Image (tube, rainbow, N blue to C red):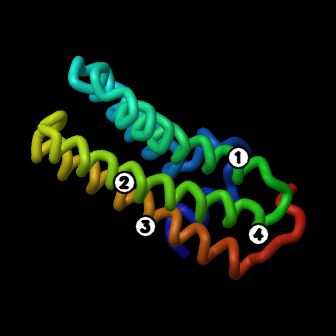
Amino acid sequence: MPRACVQVMKATCVEELLVYQKALAAAHRVSAILKRPCFQRDLRLHDQLSASSDAVPSLIAEGFGQSSDRQFAQSLYKSRSESKETRTHLRVAKGRDYVEERELVDLCSQYEEIEKMETGLIRYLQREDRKFRG
């Protein structure tokens, strides 16, 4: 059984989940980039990137608090979509020379890892399908 799945079984709070920790770290990295002056002039991209990157850990936390595996999986699907959106916004930012290639590759790799972890958790939750996670 994948490590992330064992974590879900044993976790008493969302902060114990590795996928949540990684998503929060990625969101913090994006927040640091958004402090650059170029993003202050491009408020639309700033707001879109901020919203999507913040949504990734937020949706994991929201799902963890749900009562069933199915509801948790739904939140993970949404989080995974927000992660893909974040990667797209980062590529747009790279195209506008707001981020360097190295930063883009590192952050996209970080988000891809989060998405893979979420996919594994979704599969686990669908198999278990507990109606009450308490």
Label 3 near label 4: C-beta < 8 Å?
no
Q: Which mark is residue 107?
A: none
Q: Distance between the residues labelled 3 and 2?
A: 9 Å
Amino acid type at image mark 4: Arg
Pointer 1 and pointer 2: residues touching (CB < 8 Å)?
no
What residue sits right under mark 4 in the picture?
70
Q: Which amino acid does label 2 sit on?
A: Tyr
Q: Residues within 10 Å of mark 3 (few under 14, many from 20)?
A: few
CB under 8 Å between discs 3 and 2: no
Quarter assignment of residue 10: bottom right
Of the residues under marks 1 and 2, which one precedes in the sequence? Answer: 1
Q: Pick the quarter of the image with the C terminus.
A: bottom right
Chain-order first, disc 3 or disc 1: 1
Q: Marks 1 and 4: in contact by CB < 8 Å?
A: no
Q: Earlier in the sequence, mark 4 or mark 1?
A: 1
Q: Is the residue marked by circle 2 packed among few (<14), some (14-19), or many (20+) residues within 10 Å?
A: many
Q: Label 4 to label 1, Cα distance in Å?
A: 13 Å
Secondary structure under tag 2 reads helix
Dot 4 lies on which element? helix
Residue 28 is at least partly visible in this image: no
SS of the residue under disc 1 = helix
Secondary structure found at label 3? helix
Q: In which quarter of the image is residue 40?
A: top left
Q: Name the residue under label 2.
A: 111
* Residue ID for mark 3: 116
Mark before the other along the chain sequence, 2 or 4: 4
Compared with 116, 63 (above or below) is: above
Where does label 1 land, which residue? 62
